[in-house]
Image: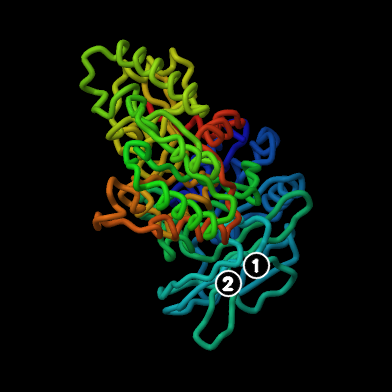
C-alpha cells in the first residue's frame, strides 16, 4: 500500500475529475494524478505497480481502440479500472476489448432498497446486507456477457438489477458503477458510509480503492469495550451485580471481555471484586497518571506520574493484575507535557474520542477516517466512541473502512454505580447490546486496547500515516 501505488484519473481537461475515486484513493494513500486518455497512454509505461485507473462512461466511450488496448494491457497485468459517472439512460455501453460485455443503462425514480452480494471484493461486514434506499437510481439492463454483481437494486415488483458490478480481466478487474458522480462529496467518508443512501453512492469507489491498495477486505475487524472508572464505582454490594452483568454480556457475545480503566489512586477494592473481573478475562489500563482530574491543570505532572507509578506497582503486586501500557485521560483532556511523560515511561499509546481540531490539516472528507492519530508530542491515540453513539449503521461504516470499533461506558451505564443495588440510578445491563449483537453477527475479533494498538501500529501503514494528525 501507499505512495508507491498510483491512481490515474482520466478525463477531459474541461470536465470534472472522478471525485469519489480521487477521495477514496487518497484515503488509501494512493498518489493521485490527473490526465487525458492520450496523456495516459503516453505515460502508461511509467505507471508502476498495479494502479487504480478511474474514468467515466462518457470518456471511456470516446477512447480510441489504441487507448482501450493500453487500458486492457494494464488491467490484464493487475490494474483496477473503475468506471463511474456520466452514464446516459438508454445508452448502450461496450467494454470491449477489455471484456466482452455490453449493457444498457436504465433508471428508476424511487428504488425502495438495494442489497450487497457476497462478492469477495466487498468489505466482509457488508456482504449479504440489504438496505433501504428510496431515491432514484441508475441500474444495468439488457446485459450481455458474464458479470459479477456487487450491488443489486431491488425493485417494487421483486426483480433485481445490477448497479455496481465487476468483470475479471486477466490479473486485474474492471469495476463498473452506473450511478452518477457525486459532485458535492464534502462530508467525511466514514459518515457517508454510515448513511444507507450515501453508502450505496460511495461504496463502489471504496471497493475500487481497496482492491488497488491490496487491502484484505475479508479480514474481520476488531472491537473493544472499555468501562472507565470501574474500580471507582465499586462498593461492597456490587459483587453479585458485577458477576451478573459480565455473564449477561458473555451470553450475548460469547468470549467478550471488558477492559477496565483504573484510576491509580483507587486502592480500596475487594479481592473478590477483582477475582470476578479476572475470571471474566478483564483487562486493566491506566485512567489518569494518579488522580481522576483534568490533566491540563496539573501543577507538577512529573510528580503526578511518579506517584502514579508507585500506586500502580502496588496495585499490580497486591492484586496480581497486569496493567496495559495504555492511558485513558480523565475527561479525555491531556497536555503535551503529560503525553511526553507517558512516552518517556514507555506507554504504547492512549485512547480518546476523535476531535475535529486533530484533523485540521486534512480535507473535510478525510476527517475521522483513520483509526488513530499522533499528537504533536508523538503519543498515538486510538479513536474510541461512547457506546450510545455506535448505532449499527455507524459500526458498519467504521468496519467497512477496516477500522476497529472501540466503545466505552461507565459503571452507572450498566447499573454498577455505587449503591445501585438499592436505589435506581439509571443504567441497564443492555447498554452495550447493539455492539455485542453486531460483534456476534459479524464475527468481529475481541481485542484489548493494547492488542488493538499493537495491531495497528505494527501494520505496514504508509496509507494510514497520510492521515495522521499534525
Q: In this view, does 82 lie above or below 87?
A: above
The residue shown at (45%, 35%) is 271
Left or right: residue 266 compared with residue 293: right
Outermost residue toward the right in this view: 170
The residue shown at (75%, 65%) is 100
Under tag 1, what secondary structure? strand
Instruction: Identify the image quadrant of the C terminus.
Output: top left
Report if the CB atoms under discs 1 and 2 are less than 8 Å apart. Answer: yes
Rendered image quadrant of residue 168: bottom right
Residue 55 place in picture, x, y as percent: 56, 53
Residue 207 place in picture, x, y as percent: 58, 53
Q: Is residue 465 above or below residue 186?
A: above
The residue that label 2 is drawn on is 152
Q: Is residue 120 above or below residue 419?
A: below
Label 1 to label 2: alpha-carbon separation: 7 Å
Count the numbered circles shown: 2
Query: Can residue 36 be seen in this snapshot?
Result: no
Report crowding for label 2: few under 14, some 14 to 19, many 20 or more residues within 10 A (C-alpha).
many
Q: Looking at the image, which is closer to me, 455 or 234?
A: 234
The residue that label 1 is drawn on is 149
Residue 249 place in picture, x, y as percent: 49, 55
Amino acid at each position: 500500500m501507499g505512495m508507491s501505488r498510483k491512481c490515474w484519473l482520466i478525463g477531459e481537461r474541461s470536465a470534472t475529475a472522478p471525485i469519489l475515486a480521487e477521495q477514496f484513493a487518497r484515503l488509501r494513500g494512493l498518489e493521485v494524478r490527473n490526465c487525458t486518455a492520450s496523456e495516459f497512454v503516453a505515460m502508461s509505461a511509467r505507471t508502476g505497480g498495479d494502479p487504480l485507473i478511474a474514468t467515466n462512461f462518457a470518456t471511456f466511450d470516446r477512447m480510441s481502440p489504441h487507448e482501450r488496448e493500453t487500458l486492457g494491457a494494464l488491467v490484464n497485468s493487475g490494474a483496477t479500472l473503475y468506471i463511474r459517472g456520466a452514464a446516459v439512460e438508454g445508452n448502450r455501453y461496450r467494454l470491449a476489448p477489455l471484456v466482452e460485455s455490453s449493457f444498457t443503462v436504465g433508471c428508476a425514480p424511487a428504488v425502495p432498497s438495494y442489497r450487497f452480494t457476497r462478492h469477495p471484493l466487498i468489505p466482509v461486514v457488508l456482504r449479504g446486507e440489504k438496505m433501504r434506499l428510496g431515491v432514484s437510481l441508475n441500474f444495468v439492463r439488457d446485459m450481455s456477457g458474464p458479470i459479477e454483481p456487487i450491488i443489486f437494486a431491488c425493485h417494487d415488483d421483486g426483480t433485481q438489477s445490477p448497479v455496481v458490478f465487476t468483470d475479471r480481466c486477466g490479473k486485474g478487474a474492471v469495476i463498473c458503477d452506473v450511478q452518477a458522480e457525486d459532485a458535492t462529496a464534502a462530508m467525511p467518508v466514514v459518515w457517508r458510509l454510515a448513511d444507507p443512501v450515501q453508502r450505496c453512492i460511495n461504496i463502489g469507489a471504496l471497493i475500487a480503492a481497496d482492491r488497488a491498495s491490496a487491502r484484505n477486505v475479508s479480514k474481520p475487524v476488531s472491537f473493544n469495550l472499555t468501562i472507565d472508572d470501574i474500580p471507582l464505582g465499586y462498593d461492597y454490594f456490587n459483587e453479585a451485580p458485577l458477576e451478573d452483568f459480565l455473564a449477561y454480556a458473555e451470553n450475548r457475545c460469547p468470549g467478550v471481555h471488558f477492559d477496565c480503566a483504573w484510576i491509580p489512586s483507587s486502592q480500596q477494592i475487594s479481592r473478590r471484586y477483582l477475582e470476578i473481573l479476572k475470571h471474566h478475562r478483564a483487562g486493566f489500563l491506566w485512567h489518569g497518571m494518579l488522580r481522576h482530574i483534568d490533566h491540563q491543570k496539573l501543577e507538577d505532572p512529573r510528580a503526578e506520574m511518579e506517584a502514579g507509578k508507585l500506586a500502580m506497582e502496588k496495585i499490580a503486586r497486591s492484586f496480581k493484575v497486569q496493567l496495559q501500557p495504555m492511558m485513558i485521560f480523565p475527561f479525555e483532556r491531556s497536555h503535551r507535557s503529560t503525553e511526553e511523560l507517558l512516552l518517556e515511561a514507555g506507554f504504547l499509546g492512549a485512547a480518546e474520542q476523535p476531535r475535529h481540531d486533530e484533523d485540521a490539516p486534512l480535507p473535510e472528507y478525510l476527517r475521522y477516517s483513520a483509526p488513530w492519530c499522533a499528537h504533536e508530542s508523538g503519543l498515538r491515540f486510538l479513536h474510541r466512541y461512547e457506546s450510545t453513539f455506535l448505532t449499527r449503521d455507524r459500526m458498519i461504516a467504521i468496519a467497512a473502512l477496516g477500522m476497529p470499533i472501540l466503545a466505552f461506558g461507565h459503571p452507572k451505564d450498566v447499573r454498577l454505580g455505587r449503591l445501585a443495588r438499592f436505589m435506581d440510578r439509571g443504567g441497564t445491563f443492555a447498554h452495550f447490546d447493539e455492539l455485542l449483537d453486531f460483534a456476534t453477527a459479524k464475527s468481529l475479533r475481541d481485542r484489548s486496547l493494547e492488542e488493538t494498538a499493537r495491531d495497528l501500529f505494527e501494520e505496514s501503514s504508509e496509507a494510514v500515516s497520510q492521515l495522521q494528525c499534525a
